[in-house]
Image (tube, rainbow, N blue to C red):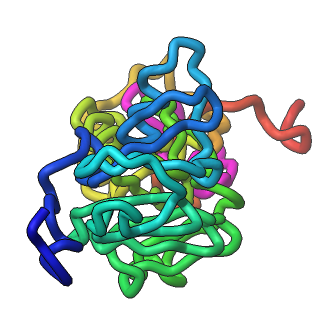
Amino acid sequence: MGFSGESRLHFGKMDYGCKHYRRRCKIRAPCCNGIFHCRHCHNESTSDRHELCRQDVKKVICLVCDAEQPVAKVCANCGVNMGEYFCEVCKFYDDETDKGQYHCDECGICRVGGRENFFHCKKCGSCYSVALLDKHSCVENSMRHHCPICYEYLFDSLQETSVLICGHTIHKECLREMVDHSQYTCPICSKSVCDMSTHWRKLDDEIEATVMPSDYRYKVWILCNDCNDNSEVFFHIVGHKCNNCHSYNTRTIAPPPEHRH
């Protein structure tokens, strides 16, 4: 190629790849022997919907010289980096190093965003932003589930995720769409996903301005989705306010056994 040293290593950087990653190699999938730019390309193209385990990849094909070879960072034939970032554990290549890729041993996969910006929560079983350190509700293996909106598996999703107040996780874009459609409760546990105090005050004013007819002035039992406390409150068509945390995120229930007549 007429290059040597560092220039040879970086030859073709960002010139090759797919919609998922910029890289200078393809992978041979051991499950079906097919050749793909990355595991996502494989998973999206298979008719029987089988998925490629990233750690099982043994062979790659350099896109600069077409040489097939064992997994390694540098092409054994032409000497280029097949990915500026390379993880031997995940068999992962990426030329876009500004993503801040790093391998988390406890997650067992590569993450993006910079190791210094994340910590691994052992109970939740995933890496979270350091901004959430000691400030989030732990839910065991919370990321090893599907997004409750789009049902994509969250643990190794390419999309950004958000950790809700309750500790459950959801794609950030799915949460944005949910809120845009005036849905403010977790799809899994029904707790509020954000500070609703301003909205609760508006409901206070609406209830005060809306007098119920005498036939509807009776009490009902409610369960608060936010604090899980039971309350006996006056029925109102607008909503029912928790006596404990003052949330309107409540639902009517049968009276507790000790209050049944």
Q: The N terminus lies in which quarter of the figure?
A: bottom left
8 left or right, relative to 100: left
**What span is in magenta?**
225-242
Q: Residue 89, position in %: x, y? A: 58, 66
Q: Residue 76, position in %: x, y? A: 41, 64
63 left or right, relative to 163: left
Q: Nearer the viewer, residue 160 or 28?
A: 28
Q: Main secondary structure of the magenta part?
A: loop
For image coordinates 34% across by 78% down, the residue present is 114
Q: Residue 101, position in %: x, y? A: 36, 71
For image coordinates 50% across by 50% down, the residue present is 156
Q: Is residue 171 visible?
A: no
162 relative to 147, above or below: below
Magenta-colored stretch includes residue 143: no
Q: Which quarter of the picture shows residue 6?
A: bottom left
For image coordinates 51% across by 35% down, the residue present is 148
133 relative to 200, above or below: below
